[in-house]
Image (spheres, rainbow, N blue to C red):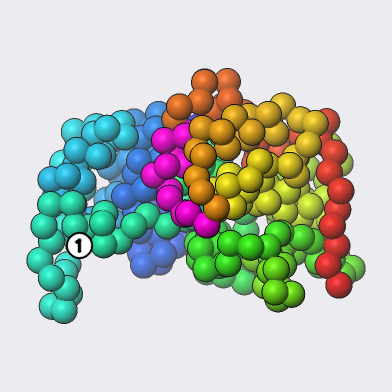
Amino acid sequence: MKLSGFPAILFLVLLAVLLPASLAAISVFDVIRLSQGRYSDAEIIRLIQTTDSRFVLSADDTVRLREAGVTENVIREMLSRPAPRRESEPPVSDGAVLRSRPEPLFSGSPYPERVGDRNGNAAVTLAGIEVLIVRDDAGFSSPLARARAAAQILNTLPASGRFAVRAAGRDSRVIFEGSDGSARDVVRVTAADVAAYRAGGHRQVSSETLSSFWAALLNDYWAVAVTGRPPRSLADSRERQALARLSRAVRLPAGTRDAAAVRAGFDSLGPADRELLRNLPAAVPEDLEFPIRRSP
C-alpha cells in the first residue's frame, strides 16, 4: 500500500534508526518493485537517501529501468549515488552489470503493510513478487535481514526437492527436503508471524497452519520458477488458478532460474490475477485446504 505524508516520513526515519545501513540498503530490484507498487517518486527517493543505497548502472540498465516503470526522477537519484568499484573489478561497460551479476530469483525487500507502518516488516520475494511476509527479527538484526537470509538459502537450494513442515511443540519451521535425502531449514515461524496472520484474516491460524501455508507457497512458486511443473500445493483455490496461469506464462525449462522471465510472465497476467498473487502471502485464505506434510 502506498505511503504518503508524515506517516511515510516517520516510517523511513524509523527504518533508518532500526536497521544498519549495510542491511537496510535497497537494491535495483527493490526500486523496481516499489515503482511498480505505485509508490511516489518522493517516497522512493527518500527511502534511497535514508538507507544510503548505492547503485552501479550502465546505459542499458537505465533503459531497462524505464521499461520496468521506474521514473526519470528516481533514475537520476540512483545515478547520483554510484557504488564504489573495487580495484579488482574491471571497468563497467554497457550491459555488463546485468550480464555478470544476474538477478537472483529470491530477494528480501521492505514490506510496509499500511500507511504509517512502524514495524519494519519485510518480504521474501521471487522476481519482485512477494512470497512470504515476515514480521519480527527471530534472532536477526531486523526483519529485512531475516527475509534476506531466507532468500539466500532459497537461492542456493538444489532444483530437485520439495518444501515441508518440521514441527515440535510450539516450534514450527519450513524445511527443504532434497531428492538425495538431505534436509535444510529455510525459515522458522515465530509468534509474531502467527499473531500478524491472525490479525490479517478471519481464519484461525496456528504456527503449524502458517508453516504449512508457507511451505505450500514455496512449493508452488518453486514449481513455477525452478522445476517447470504446474503448481499443485494450493489446490482448489482462486489463487492456485492464478498461479497456474503464471506457470503457463513463464514456461521455463526445468532447472532454469531466470528472474526476468518470471517477472515478464507476471506482468503478462491480467490485473485480477496480479492482484490475487500480490495479496496471496498476506493472509491464509479462508477456503484454502492443504495437507500438512511433516518431516521427522
Position of residue 102 in the picture relative to residue 155 (left or right): left
Residue located 76% across and 30% down the image: 237
Snapshot quadrant of residue 140: bottom right
Q: Which residues are magenta?
A: 255-266
Above or below, comparing residue 144 to residue 276 in the picture: below
Q: Main secondary structure of the magenta part?
A: helix
- Residue 291 seen: yes
The residue wearing badge 1 is 83
Above or below, comparing residue 188 to residue 240 in the picture: below
Position of residue 169 in the picture relative to residue 230 (left or right): right
- Residue 132 seen: no
Residue extending furthest toward the right? 169
Residue located 52% across and 57% down the image: 255
Residue located 50% across and 45% down the image: 252
Residue 89 in the image: state x and y as whole percent.
16, 73
Position of residue 129 in the picture relative to residue 281 (left or right): left
Above or below, comparing residue 146 to residue 285 in the picture: below
